[in-house]
Image (tube, rainbow, N blue to C red):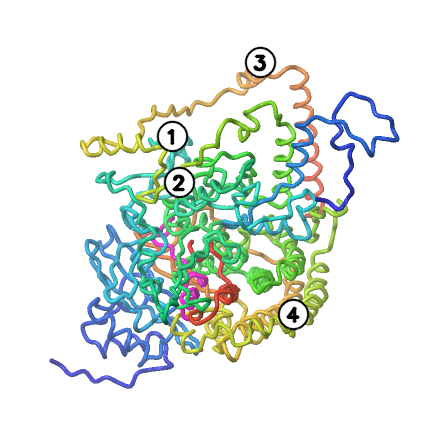
Amino acid sequence: MVDYEVQAPPTTGSAQDAATYLKARFPGVVSDDTRPGFQGVIVQADKLGEVAQAIRDELGYNYLSSATAVDYLGAGDHMEMVYHAYRISGGGALNFKVQTEREKPVVPSLVNVYPGANFQEREAYDLYGIHFSGHPNLKRILMWEGFAGYPMRKDWREAYYEGEAKPFESRWPAGWVHRAEERNVFGSNVRYPADFDLSKLTDISDQAVYNSASISGMGVDYQQDEMETDQLVVNMGPHHPSTHGVFRMVLKLDGETITGLEPVMGYLHRNHEKIGERNTYLHNIPFTDRLDYISSMGNNFGYVMAVEQLMALGARYTPPTRRAEIIRVLMAELTRIVNHLWSIGFFLNDLGAFFTPMLYANAEREKILDFFEAVAGSRLMCNYMRFGGVFKDIPDRIRSTANLMNDRIRDYDTMEFLSDMINERLPRFLEEYDRYLTGNEILLERTVGQGVLSAEDAIAMSCAGPLLRGSGVAYDVRRADPYSIYPELDFDIPVGKQGDLFDRYMVRMQEMHESLRILRQLLPLLEETKGQDIMSGTRAYNPRIPQGESYGRVENPKGELGFYVVSWGDAKGTQNPWRYHVRAPSFINLTALGPMSVGQKVADVVSILGSIDIVLGETDR
Amino acid sequence: MSSKELDLRQVHDTEFPLPAEMQGNVAITSLSKIYNWSRRSSMWPMLFGLACCAIEMIGTASSRFDFSRFGMEVMRATPRQSDLMIVSGTVTKKMIVPIVRLYNQMPEPKYVMAMGACASGGGPFKEGYNVVSGIDKYLPVDVYVPGCPPTPQALLYGLIALQKKIDGQSLANLDDVPWYGVGPSEPTPIPILGPDIIDPRQMDLIRRQAELAAAGKPYGVRELPPVVKTTKAIPSKAAKAAVAEVVDEGELKRREEAARRRQAVLARKRARDAAKGV
């Protein structure tokens, strides 16, 4: 056996250097991904644990951003796990992949190396049927236990299946249609497997939840003379008002102290990714709105960036125009303020200040929504950005009729409206909010020192956004891996010190100030570029995207939002993504919920969840 | 309730003349009217949101739109205290089980509002494998509010529509007030999470289909008559004649007039744009 000369690992170099090092360190195990448009390395499945260990410890890629599966049926007939790891000090991704057979896919679990892979591996198990050997809690996460099949596999067809890819023949060009429920015998969106055993008609979906390691083992745990206490299992959700939607927690309690917590999700799993694979690239933009439905503009931004990265592989690609980039950043930062107003309002709701802070925050939020409505035509689901720009310029005047108080139509000059909002209204409001809340004794009592998450844990569990920064890690994609026009803007990254609830609250408050700072710099740029193009290239209804893979990520208000898009199957370029995966910050941030909550009281788990700031559209997708 | 004092003229419902000076103090009304009035003026929704529409629902509850003006601000977190279930968002197969359970726990009279495209019929996510295409597959819906998501204005309109619906009900009609019928009302059977969602009401059908599957016959899909694809263009004269047959003369004139006006507006706009371009 040849003894390869292995140089010292490059802990600061590019992903290229890292790949070279890995190939020398693990000869025959690591190889380049040579498919056109693909990056990174392919690792042999049985050695994945060792390689990942080296990637984390020797190369310094200590932050696992995304782990997801792809089914290459008919294109090599294998399953693939794709990992994107980053250095917490900044820089690009190291993309490593593992390939496994489709029939009995087994991949070693990376939970020991990257605890943040926990939920993502469970998701891959749930939707693709990949077994992760060594995973501590491998069970379905989005669907229920007992569901038939692995729905994200390419050969799995949903009950309302009509065709592999849109536009469906029935709609275009012939234009006839049978309603899906007419075609189904049950008149409903259901399909039962052929070997459906009617005698076993019991609902086993909850058994797996109660059997999981964190909450199983109920019984008498304290006994003295005649007194004995039980540990108690309490269900919170999925319709609990404090779980921010349809999230469910199963808590094991000792008195009022939490000894175990099992998050249960999937109550809003509406199959984004399956639908996304059937859709054309353009179709997916309005669907991204509905991921994190409070900050739709930010979601648009991430998705168009991912697809633009793919388009850049082609010959005739022109990057977005400057005005488009300015408008995009304007929208993204306004969205950040919208989201933080909302999340702080609800955080205080969770602390017991029922609805009053929320009302104040929401009143300001509505002003920004007015602007969104004037620009994009919709308050909430903006569907605003397109590949190469945005679909519509900012109008000269804002006319809003949604003033129910006096039915007067209000009419503003847009730039005046923006400047008034950015320079006057929002700073005044933030100052007022700060004065009422930040020093408030009840708020301090409830938040300081509660729900602590250390910096090491936050990085290991792939936390993102204010949750990560609240723990003192100054990691913000806008600075760590800059995109759009952020490099030329002047702003700071607020961080916390202790990683408790109060730090997260303060990070959000300060981020709003920083966003305002960015917005102030954008106003003159908007004036400067007035009348310039908002879109580059031709406006294609159904663009062909060159083959390849891309991972576009943005710093969304809730954390790092990534889109992993694969275009495959047609050398001329595809019209539908082969794989469309969303790295949802809310979903992965929830990994930290259990560790943060154990040892706290029941009332605190509500505020801890509020401080993570989840949104279920994104958690469950 | 609104802070305004009770105006008895609202509930006055008779031909019997009242002297003007007594109209603010005395009302003569029917039992149905006062019953409906009190029900519709204190419609307490259940505090639970499913998806994006819930954000707009909270927006409607907030200060700008403020549905407490219609007596609906008391959102209860428990089904046992609520009258109205606003299904605000995509109903998934996993979530329909708790939703049906919640509905069964609501005391009568109870109402269901399908807010948004998803709750009404699946919306953009209809084809999804985990999506119930419309809450009306399981629960009786009183009002559908279109939109994705509906604006707060639309939701308010839906709530007012529900109030109007209640106003039209009669205590004498058991179809309107089934909760005064004989015996307790039947709870909606709770779906089961099996290999797919199982509606207990469809059990027979499922069994028959399973037998077909066991026999190796095609199952699950219904054969539909082939679609007649017409590609023949209809000549405009024939189309006009066909329209004229259905629509009366005055209506046709009005339509032509409107079309002319539209054309004129467009022409003016084009001229203006052209002038601006120069």
Report the amino acid beneath label 2.
Answer: Ile
Would you name the residue on which mark 4 appears? A437
Between circles 1 and 4, the one closer to the viewer is: 4
- Residue B245 - label: 3
Kind of residue indicated by mark 3: Glu
Name which of mark 3 and mark 2 comes first in the sequence: 2
Categorize mark 3 by other alpha carbons within 10 Å: few (<14), some (14-19), many (20+).
few
Label 4 – label 3 distance at C-alpha: 70 Å
* Residues at circles 3 and 2 in contact by the CB criterion of under 8 Å: no
Residue beneath disc 2: B190
Tell me, yes or no, whether the two marked residues, 2 and 1, touch with CB atoms within 8 Å.
Answer: no
Q: Residue at x 39, y 33 (%)?
A: A181
Q: Is residue A504 left or right of residue B97?
A: right
Q: Extreme front residue here? A: A226
Question: Relative to residue B64, is residue A176 drawn left or right?
Answer: left
A394 or B212: nearer the eye? B212
Instruction: Tell me whether circle 2 and circle 4 mark residues in contact (CB < 8 Å).
Output: no
Mark 4 is surrounded, within 10 Å at the Cα level, by few (under 14), some (14 to 19) or many (20 or more) other residues, namely: some
Indicate yes or no whether the magenta region holds residue B205.
no
Q: Amino acid at mark 1?
A: Glu
The chain letter under disc 4 is A
Marks 1, 3: nearer the viewer: 1
Subunit of mark 2? B
Letter of the chain that mark 1 sits on in the rendering: A
